[in-house]
Image: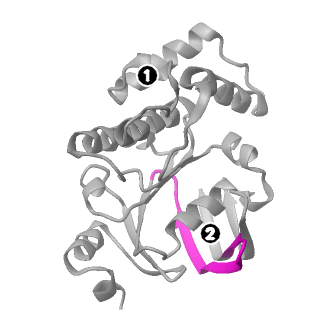
Amino acid sequence: MLKIENLHAEVTSDSGAKKILKGLTLEVGAGEVHAIMGPNGAGKSTLAYVLGGRPGYEVTEGSVTFMGEDLLAMDPHERAASGMFLGFQYPVEIPGVSNVQFLREALNSQRRTRGEEPLSGGEFLKLAKEKAGLLKLDMEMLKRFVNVGFSGGEKKRAEMVHMGILDPKLAVLDETDSGLDIDALKIVGQGINTIMRSPDKGVLLITHYQRLLDYVKPDHVHVLADGRIVKSGGPELALQLENEGYEAVAA
């Protein structure tokens, strides 16, 4: 499904270019959940941004294929239409645009790109109510401006509703557990399982901590350090990281 080979990438800022990814190789198959863990500055969010096509992140070497296609040759909207979803560590606010309006336009834009008929207003609202119910998010919240006035947990639950409505093939979730209390963590974890646990879907879950993995059981866990995967294993690797720390495990 997703194949990353020898990926090198740098981020450009006013102070110049800084190399972040330094030969990262990873493959996510259909039906698999992969967790990426690592210390701050290891390149976890950079990987997510590169996959999503965020401006300012330049690939200098390597390749990424998604569903057999060259992902790096696609614009961000084409990546989304092909079935990729990027969940942000810090979901942005969009004043003046309601969640319902935003999501209906996003979904129908993707459907048109794929040659599918757009959903009517009634069809979309039925779908939105179903997905909001899975995440225990009041439908009234979807009528509010995107993330404006939402708590950290509400933003993450709303983002999972977005994922459910868009129904991607691959979800790249960048620290979805950030800012969640215990109850919200459980709801979001269950939502990921309900929406993405399928033989034809995949998840790349970026996290600092084991706690989300108690609810979203990964098939594979990878340690990312200094821009590359330095160790891989099963779910037990996450527990080892929690107990011993990154430095001891990745040495």
The magenta region covers 9-31
- The residue at 73%/24% (across/down) is 116
- The residue at 62%/21% (across/down) is 101
- Picture coordinates of residue 52, whole percent (x, y): 64, 54
Dividing the image into 4 quarters, which one contains the N terminus? Answer: bottom right
Is disc 2 placed on a helix, strand or loop? strand
- Picture coordinates of residue 228, whole percent (x, y): 53, 80
Foreground pick, 134 / 169: 134
- The residue at 48%/76% (across/down) is 42
* Residue 104 placement: quadrant: top right
Left or right of 158 on screen, residue 82: right
> Is residue 10 located in the magenta-colored stretch of the structure?
yes
Helix, strand or loop for the magenta stretch, by majority? strand
Give the residue at mark 2. Answer: 4
CA neighbours of label 1 inside 10 A, class few (<14), some (14 to 19), many (20+): some
Foreground pick, 148 / 46: 148
Q: Is residue 122 above or below residue 9?
A: above
Q: Is residue 68 above or below residue 129?
A: below
- The residue at 68%/25% (across/down) is 105
Foreground pick, 37 / 219: 37
Is disc 1 placed on a helix, strand or loop? helix
Q: CA distance from mark 2 to mark 1?
A: 37 Å
* Residue 19 placement: quadrant: bottom right
Left or right of 34 on screen, residue 11: right
Q: Is residue 2 above or below residue 194?
A: below
Q: Is residue 201 above or below residue 40?
A: above
Q: Looking at numbered disc 2 in the image, what kind of residue is underneath it?
A: Ile
> Is residue 33 located in the magenta-colored stretch of the structure?
no
Give the residue at mark 1. Answer: 141
Left or right of 88 on screen, residue 183: left
